[in-house]
Structures are given as structure tokens and as C-alpha cells.
């Protein structure tokens, strides 16, 4: 391709391209984005010669088959590419300070508990309505985590057997969780992955399967599980609610237990394990075994909260993109700093289709924009 033909392809005059290549005229960020797009490269490669940032693969699975490396990398690449664009444009996402493991806390279990207490304090202090973490619906909890800790969370399709991906660098903090009908597991996975972020465990891409409360061999997984349990079911709140429902029902009945499941938005097995840890029930007792055998749906039915169950179910099965990341890419496009391709790639849609949605073509004439209506009564359409 001649230089003149290439200039036309990227929307520059041959004169401007020639001056820019000679160092007389500076390339704009939009020029670089268009040149990179035409050449099948990244802006970072044009400026530095570096290959795009790609995650190191570190699978940490608690059960099930290990996912294929390529499919996991593909899931992460869409998001890391968006961070690369923002960093090159000088608009990396803000990363507020966040709680960390205290040097004097040696045991991993104690570290998870301490991190959760600090995180609960940050989240509840930031909430203007003074709600508890248990009182936050999962989508609201995600927004709160983004605002408080600078963690971008997406609900997106992941490889089979993968519940979540976590990765953090000096410029971003990312959590990906998969859509599912088991919304209590999704909520626990979110909390578990946040524990990895706060403990700085995810310097390499962490890939996890079947995240759930239970015994783990990896101490970082133990810490993340303890963190998740204490974040979603803080000891003071559990004890207070336990006394309330036990007093109202006379004892911890199945109905009272179901109320706790609904209140804390966790699975019956997770709640049963937490009550046992706090010595509120005997894990070996027959009632405890019965509680663990209940389903989340049955508990909501017994508590008269089937509508809440259906709302959580619908939300957990839907995809969600990190709002902050999407908004930042669109702002860069609107201000002429890049093309729509980075945003289209992040959303997984065709760039031309996205362009039509955001910049619809004007009608050929004013008359074409007005539909003809026969004379008669006015028509009101909602």
C-alpha cells in the first residue's frame, strides 16, 4: 500500500501523514488509534514496540476439571485490552487505597477475618443509608465494591467449570464471575474473589472452579473463604439476628432458619456452617443436618420471600459489564481520542452495529422523519 493510500484509509491527508512521520506534526491519539486499527496492531505497540499485556495463567481450582488455557485467556483479554487503551490515553481507572493484611496477623484464618472486618467498615461507612452488607443486593454490592475499592466487576460468560477470575496489577483490579442460576454461589464467589484482591493474592490471573465454603488445602483459598463468610455474615450481625428470630419463634425453627437465609442472602449450607462456627448451633445435631439439606428456594418459600428469590435469580443469570470501564471508553470516543473498536471489543458486539446505535444516521429529509397519519382522532401511544 502506498503512503497516500494508507493516509486515505486512516482518514488523514497525505500531507498530514507525511509531516507526522517526519516529526513536524504530532500524531493525535485518534490518529494513532486509527493507524493501529488499520495495521492490526495496538497503540502501545506503535509507541513502544511492546506486545499487549497478557495474563499469566495460574489456575487455582477447588474442584472439577482444569479449564483450557486459551479459553481462560480469551475471557480476560477483552477486559485487559480495555485497560491498556485507557492507560495509553492517560485515563487509567482510579485505584483508591484499600484494607490490607496487618503485619502482626500471622494466621491466614485471622487475616481473612480481619480483612473482612475492615472491608465491612469501609462499605457500610460509604453507604449513605447505613445499610449492612447483608442488606445490599448483589448488584448494589458490586457497585459499592467498585466505588470503595476500585474493583471492576463483570458478570460474563466464562469457560465451563469456572466460577470466577481475579486479576490485579498496578493499574487495575478485576473480578469476573459467571452468570448462573445458583445466585448464592455467585454472591459467595464475588466475596471470595474480593478477598483475593484485598489480600493481594491475584498478582497473576487466578482461575477458580466451584468456589464454596469448606475445607481447602491452599492457605490463600482458606483466607479468601474466611473473608467471604465474615463479609457476608459478620459475627455481630449473625448473633443479633439469631437472637431476634429465636426469641420470636421461641427457638431456632426451620422457619426461623429460613428467615436468616433470606436476610443474609446465602445458601442454607453456608449459613449452617457459620452458625456452627459461632457456636450458635451444634453442627452434629439432627436439626443442623436438616438445615443443611434445605435449598435456598425452599427457605425463601417458607419465609414468604419468593419474589426476592426470583429477583436474585433473574439478576444472577444476566450479564453485566463494569459500568466504570464502559463509561470511560465511551468518553474517550466521544472526545475524539479513540475509535469505537475498544468499546465494541469489550462489549463483544460488532463495531458497525455499535456505531449505528450510538450515532444513528440522520433521515434523508425532514419529511422522511415524520410518519404520515390520516386525519381523524388523535392517537396516543405510550
Image (cartoon, grey):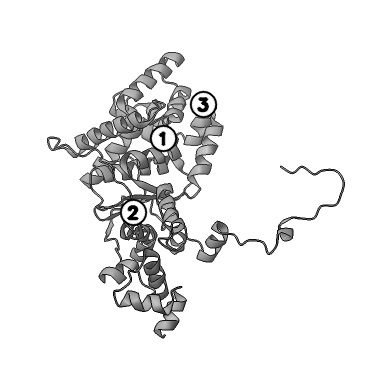
* Of pointers 1 and 3, the one earlier in the residue sequence: 1
Q: Quadrant of the C terminus?
A: top right
Mark 3–mark 2 Cα distance, whole angstroms, equals 47 Å
Report the residue at 46% width, 16% height from top.
Answer: 249
Name the one closer to the observer, 10 or 77: 10
Q: Position of residue 307 (x, y in %)?
A: 56, 33
**Residue most extreme to the right:** 376
Residue 228 seen in render: yes
Q: Which residue is mark 3?
A: 303
Residue that badge 2 annotates = 91
- Whole-percent x, y for residue 59 in the image: 29, 57
Q: Determine the residue positioned at 50% across, 48% down.
A: 318
- What residue is at 54 percent from the left and 38 percent from the top? 310
| Separation of marks 2 and 1 at Cα, in angstroms | 37 Å
Q: Is residue 269 left or right of residue 350?
A: left
Which of the two residues, 257 or 82, is positioned nearer the viewer here?
A: 82
- 255 versus 179 height, above or below: above
Q: Which mark is residue 266?
A: 1
Which one is in front in this view, the residue at disc 2 or the one at disc 1?
2
x, y (%) of residue 276? 31, 28
Residue closest to the eye, 202 or 93: 93
Density class for disc 2 (Cα within 10 Å; few <14, some 14-19, many ≥20) is: some
**In 3D space, how far apart are the residues under numbered discs 1 and 3 (Cα atoms)?**
14 Å
Secondary structure under tag 1 reads: loop
- When asked about the image quadrant of residue 184, the answer is top left
Amino acid at each position: 500500500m502506498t503512503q497516500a493510500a494508507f493516509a486515505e484509509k486512516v482518514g488523514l491527508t497525505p500531507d498530514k501523514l507525511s509531516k507526522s512521520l517526519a516529526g513536524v506534526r504530532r500524531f493525535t491519539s485518534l490518529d494513532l488509534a486509527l493507524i493501529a486499527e488499520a495495521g492490526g496492531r495496538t497503540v502501545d505497540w506503535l509507541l513502544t514496540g511492546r506486545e499487549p499485556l497478557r495474563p499469566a495463567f495460574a489456575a487455582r481450582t477447588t474442584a472439577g476439571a482444569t479449564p483450557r488455557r486459551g479459553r481462560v485467556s480469551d475471557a480476560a483479554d477483552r477486559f485487559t485490552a480495555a485497560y491498556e487503551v485507557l492507560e495509553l490515553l492517560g485515563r487509567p481507572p482510579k485505584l483508591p487505597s484499600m484494607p490490607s493484611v496487618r503485619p502482626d496477623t500471622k494466621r491466614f484464618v485471622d487475616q481473612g477475618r480481619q480483612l473482612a472486618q475492615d472491608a465491612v467498615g469501609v462499605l457500610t461507612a460509604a453507604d449513605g443509608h447505613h445499610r449492612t452488607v447483608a442488606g445490599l443486593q448483589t448488584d448494589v454490592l458490586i457497585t459499592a465494591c467498585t466505588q470503595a475499592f476500585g474493583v471492576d466487576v463483570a458478570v460474563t460468560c466464562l469457560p465451563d467449570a469456572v466460577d470466577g477470575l481475579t486479576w490485579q496489577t498496578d493499574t487495575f483490579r478485576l473480578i469476573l464471575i459467571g452468570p448462573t442460576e445458583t445466585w448464592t454461589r455467585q454472591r459467595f464467589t464475588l466475596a471470595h474473589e474480593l478477598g483475593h484482591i484485598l489480600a493481594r493474592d491475584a498478582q497473576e490471573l487466578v482461575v477458580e472452579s466451584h468456589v464454596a465454603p469448606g475445607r481447602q488445602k491452599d492457605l490463600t483459598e482458606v483466607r479468601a473463604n474466611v473473608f467471604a463468610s465474615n463479609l457476608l455474615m459478620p459475627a455481630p450481625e449473625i448473633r443479633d439476628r439469631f437472637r431476634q428470630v429465636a426469641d420470636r419463634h421461641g427457638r431456632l425453627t426451620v422457619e426461623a432458619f429460613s428467615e436468616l437465609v433470606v436476610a443474609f442472602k446465602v445458601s442454607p449450607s453456608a449459613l449452617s456452617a457459620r452458625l456452627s462456627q459461632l457456636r450458635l448451633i451444634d453442627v452434629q445435631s439432627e436439626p443442623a443436618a436438616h438445615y443443611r439439606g434445605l435449598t435456598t428456594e425452599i427457605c425463601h418459600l417458607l419465609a414468604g420471600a419468593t419474589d426476592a428469590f426470583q429477583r436474585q435469580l433473574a439478576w444472577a443469570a444476566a450479564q453485566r459489564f463494569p459500568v466504570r470501564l464502559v463509561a470511560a471508553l465511551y468518553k474517550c470516543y466521544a472526545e475524539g481520542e479513540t475509535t469505537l473498536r475498544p468499546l465494541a471489543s469489550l462489549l463483544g458486539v460488532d463495531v458497525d452495529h455499535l456505531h449505528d446505535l450510538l450515532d444513528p444516521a440522520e433521515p434523508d429529509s425532514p419529511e422522511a422523519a415524520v410518519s404520515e397519519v390520516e386525519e381523524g382522532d388523535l392517537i396516543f401511544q405510550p
